[in-house]
Image (spheres, rainbow, N blue to C red):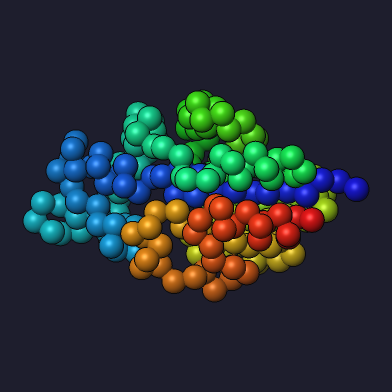
Amino acid sequence: MNKPLLISDCDDVLLHFAPHFAEWVAETHGLVFNLDQPNFAGALRDADGEPVARERVWPLLDHFFLAEMHRQHLVPGAFAALKRIGETADIVILTNIGDQHRANRIAQLEAFDIRHRVLCNQGGKGPPVAELIADMAPSATVFVDDLAHHHDSVASHAPDVWRLHMIAEPRLAAISPPAPQAHARIDAWDEALPWILGKLA
């Protein structure tokens, strides 16, 4: 029988992202990223409090991942959880950034001694999750992500996958409801680990 599989997002699941992005846009662009606003694009405001145009948001994200990933740090419990899960399961990190940032993401994770296969994706994560399952034929699969629309996508394309909604940034977690298509919502790795191991068994 093939090994089970954990497919995990990275930003605000394994590594803190939102507060570091907020710090960077304030320092370098004079913008405010409101961590009390659940809509990412709507959370970014200029000095007058006006929303930043959507077409400007994505280049800012691109630049952050190009040059500012060194700001990010590990989510508490993530390393220990991955180490324990990796004793019995394969692990793939499916990160929603462009392929041009893959080498940086791999190096970033390796600096924290996290060494697993990294795949980049843009758009819903259902298709790449389905492809991984078709290629690897795992005995069971758990998908972990902080964004509800990715759980919707995985539910549609790979409905047999166990889906865990995790938001490691406490301020975002406090204002974000559980993803309707997730099987569970757990925002801390030490609490999530038993749930994940049980589903992968």
Q: Quadrant of residue 87?
A: top right
Q: Is residue 21 above or below residue 40?
A: above
State whether residue 38 appears in this view. Answer: yes
Question: Image check: 161 left or right of 68?
Answer: right
Location of residue 176 in the rendering, given as x and y in whole percent from the top left corner: 40, 67
Report the quarter where the C terminus lies. bottom right
> Where 167 sits versus 9, above or below?
below
Measured from the top left, where is residue 190 in percent x and y? Answer: 56, 53
Name the residue: 52% across, 69% down: 179
Question: Is any atom of residue 150 visible in this view?
Answer: no
Q: Residue at x 59, y 61 (%)?
A: 164
Does residue 197 lie above or below 151 as drawn? above
In front here: 6 or 57?
6
Instruction: Give the residue displayed 73% in from the left and 48% down from the top.
Output: 5
- Farthest-out residue, left: 48
In front of the other: 11 or 61:
11
Q: Position of residue 122 (x, y in %)?
A: 51, 47
Q: Position of residue 183 (x, y in %)?
A: 62, 69
